[in-house]
């Protein structure tokens, strides 16, 4: 389902080895994809409620409507592959297997949060799950992704890096510098533009010249691939090509995934730049969870009753995460001076105690 | 002990650390094939190969961030800015990524990276190429900021910086690359965060760093000719500051002149002055004087630029002022 106008660019006419085929998922694995999408939706809805109750502060960017992108793309990765994204990071963290509890606790600023309450909504991290943030400056994560991929290649691990960015980030200099370096040095990195059409409140028609955005790959002689972000199967299929290219040939690619967010840019956004009708229409024609659910019904791998059970479990997990976050302790004030510097082990510690 | 230039000392440090640790890589503009814009990386490509010594495109934000990402994965990159004046286009990567990822992640990551390169004014390269940015980077909580003045310190401190598990801004001064001094051979480290008394004296303390240390030493000669005994403290490291060494000298002389090439507003000298008045108020016999670069963009014309730079004459005048 490549969008019109997108040219598929390959740096080689034919890959040296024919890439492995996209693995066919078992029925239960397909249901798991749906389960993850529903969990992200319910988690975000609970987070929105908690934000309205002022239990979550600061900025809070929800992933509602974009679930198929993170779930579909991350399902094509090995557990040790790297994932890095921008500030709308809750969905990717959950899709990567971070727990609802540690994520919600981070939103609540609790010591049990995935970043010990120091990151907040925009700065989730789990080194253990190879989820390298959660980055707050638009496009700022894109050179980091090139560096992670550089290290993967340097160490010959066979791992790849997936870096998500929004459609607003394509006009940042750092993004272009990163694409050039990735292509020049043949780094195993996949840049995924989650094109939800709006950079904050500015429609892409008023912020970007040159469509489709994936054309930016051409200038760097990178593979350019597009996918329908409302269709988790299409995301998986197209991402698989990009991941194989990175894994088997150490070549980067740019994947543009068309999606749509149903909520504001952040919880602080009244959304005056688009109509309620526009949102309703987009939901009606291509809501990713309903679309996939209906497909699974047709495939007879899911019954309505089973779906209800998924809903019930997802709501329960999100509520449990809220309860866990509420019950968790605030960070001790003394922790404000922790996590600034890593301990030294090759030279003597040379810093005076903080506050001395 | 061998007498070598600052650039040779830096080259030895890089070479020895790359030899010792396969995770150390060097990247930057012209560091490989060209052998370094200032020849600091001369011969390293031949010794360690293109996998570890990498010419980058002119993309400071891109390659500085790439270095941070590689450090998050356990490599120990040395990222060269041809001059620190160019680091400003990488400021977000240095401040927000190198400077905050460990903290923002609750301590999950170490960022063992060294950003290094030349800096400073005085060679008539105009406003865009003359910055001394140590105070900008010292304002980043996680950052270590090192500014060597002598070849032995350049080598010993760079080796320590590469072995640190935390981000370091290692700010060299272009005027000093050809400066020669005795440098011990082999694996000799200089401790980060320790100032050096490079001339003992009793009546006034001149506190300086990097090229300004040499300005202070020249002033101390002038003062000696007038019968005034000046002590010169080379900070070596701007962050963390070696406050005990500073205070010991202040207690001894009771008078202070701070010499810094950067602009005056919120320059590191303001912090040093604060620390002294706060901790050794009763030891002071005169207000602390500062001699800084003048608060103007760096001009090109020689006569204008020389007026802007701290000079031995300005330092001598300030020192005499503290003596009444």
Image: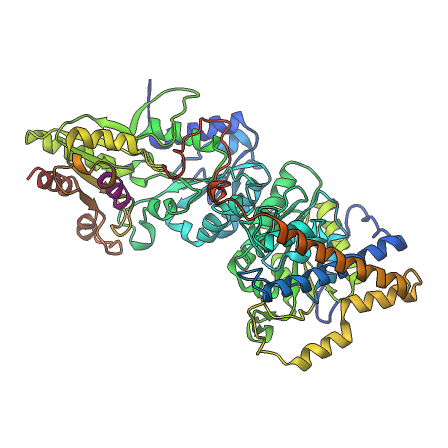
Residue B115: x, y in percent?
44, 41
Magenta segment: does it hold A344? Answer: no
Tell me: B280 left or right of A253: left
| Residue projecting furthest to the top | B1
Overall secondary structure of the magenta stretch? helix
- State whether residue A161 is above or below residue B233: below
Numbered marks: total? 0
Residue A297 seen in the current view: yes
Residue A137: x, y in percent?
52, 57
- State whether residue B2 is above or below residue A65: above
- State whether residue B162 is above or below residue A148: above
Magenta part of the chain = B270-277
Q: Nearer the viewer, residue A147 or A308?
A: A308
Residue A257 picture quarter: bottom right
Magenta segment: does it hold B274? Answer: yes
Question: Dividing the image into 4 quarters, which one contains the N terminus of chain B?
Answer: top left
Q: Nearer the viewer, residue B96 or A334?
A: A334
Tell me: B153 left or right of A82: left
- State whether residue A91 is above or below residue B81: below
Give me the residue at 11% from left, 33% from top.
Answer: B222
| Residue projecting furthest to the front | A327
Give me the residue at 71% from left, 78% from top.
Answer: A280
Residue B277 picture quarter: top left
Give me the residue at 67% from left, 54% from top.
Answer: A323
Q: Nearer the viewer, residue B246 or B130?
A: B246
């Amino acid at each position: 389902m490549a969008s019109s106008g997108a040219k598929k660019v390959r740096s080689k006419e034919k890959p040296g080895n024919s890439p492995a085929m996209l693995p066919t998922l078992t029925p239960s694995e397909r249901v798991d994809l749906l389960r993850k999408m529903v969990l992200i939706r319910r988690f975000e809805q609970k987070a929105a409620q908690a934000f309205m109750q002022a239990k979550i502060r600061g900025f809070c960017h929800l992933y509602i409507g974009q679930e198929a992108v993170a779930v579909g793309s991350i399902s094509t990765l090995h557990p040790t592959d790297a994932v890095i994204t921008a500030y709308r990071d809750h969905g990717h963290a959950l899709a990567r297997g971070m727990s609802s509890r540690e994520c919600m606790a981070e939103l609540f600023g609790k010591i049990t949060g995935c970043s010990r309450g120091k990151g907040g909504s925009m700065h989730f991290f789990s080194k253990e799950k190879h989820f390298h943030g959660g980055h707050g400056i638009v496009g700022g994560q894109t050179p980091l992704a090139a560096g992670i991929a550089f290290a993967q290649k340097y160490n010959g691990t066979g791992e790849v890096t997936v870096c998500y960015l929004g459609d607003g980030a394509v006009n940042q200099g750092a993004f272009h510098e990163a694409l050039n370096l990735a292509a020049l040095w043949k780094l195993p990195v996949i840049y995924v533009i989650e094109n939800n059409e709006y950079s904050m409140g500015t429609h892409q028609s008023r912020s970007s010249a040159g469509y489709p955005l994936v054309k930016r790959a051409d200038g760097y002689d990178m593979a350019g691939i597009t996918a329908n972000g409302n269709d988790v199967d299409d995301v998986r299929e197209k991402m698989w090509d990009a991941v194989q290219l990175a894994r088997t040939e150490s070549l980067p690619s740019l994947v543009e995934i068309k999606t749509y967010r149903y909520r504001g840019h952040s919880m602080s956004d009244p959304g005056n730049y688009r109509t309620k009708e526009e949102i309703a229409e987009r939901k009606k024609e291509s809501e990713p969870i309903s679309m996939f659910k209906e497909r699974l019904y047709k495939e007879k791998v899911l019954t309505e009753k089973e779906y209800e059970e998924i809903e019930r479990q997802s709501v329960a997990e999100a509520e449990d995460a809220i309860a866990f976050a509420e019950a968790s302790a605030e960070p001790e004030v003394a922790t404000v001076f922790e996590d600034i510097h890593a301990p030294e082990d090759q030279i003597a510690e040379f810093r005076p105690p903080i506050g001395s | 002990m061998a007498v070598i230039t600052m650039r040779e000392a830096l080259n030895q440090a890089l070479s020895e650390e790359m030899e010792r640790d396969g995770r150390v890589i060097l990247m930057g503009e012209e560091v490989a094939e060209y052998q370094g814009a200032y020849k600091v990386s001369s011969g390293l490509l031949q010794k360690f190969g293109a996998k570890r010594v990498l010419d980058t495109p002119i993309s400071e934000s891109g390659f500085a961030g790439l270095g941070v990402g590689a450090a998050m994965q356990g490599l120990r990159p040395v990222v060269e800015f041809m001059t620190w004046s160019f680091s400003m286009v990488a400021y977000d990567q240095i401040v927000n990524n190198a400077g905050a990822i460990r903290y923002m992640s609750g301590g999950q990551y170490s960022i063992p990276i060294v950003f290094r390169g030349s800096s400073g004014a005085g060679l008539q390269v105009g406003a865009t190429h003359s910055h001394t940015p140590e105070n900008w980077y010292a304002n980043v909580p996680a950052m270590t900021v090192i500014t060597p003045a002598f070849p032995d310190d350049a080598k010993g401190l760079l080796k320590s910086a590469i072995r640190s598990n935390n981000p370091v801004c290692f700010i060299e001064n272009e005027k000093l690359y050809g400066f020669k001094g005795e440098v011990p051979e082999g694996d000799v480290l200089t401790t980060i965060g320790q100032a050096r008394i490079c001339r003992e004296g009793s009546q006034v303390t001149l506190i300086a760093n990097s090229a300004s240390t040499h300005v202070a030493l020249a002033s101390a000669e002038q003062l000696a000719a007038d019968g005034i005994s000046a002590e010169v403290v080379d900070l070596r490291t701007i962050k963390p500051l070696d406050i005990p060494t500073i205070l010991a000298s202040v207690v001894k002389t009771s008078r202070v002149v701070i010499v810094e090439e950067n602009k005056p507003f919120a320059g590191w000298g303001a912090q040093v002055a604060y620390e002294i008045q706060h901790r050794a108020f009763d030891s002071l016999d005169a207000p602390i004087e500062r001699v800084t670069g003048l608060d103007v963009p760096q001009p090109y014309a020689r006569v204008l630029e020389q007026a802007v730079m701290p000079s031995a004459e300005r330092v001598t005048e300030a020192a005499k002022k503290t003596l009444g």
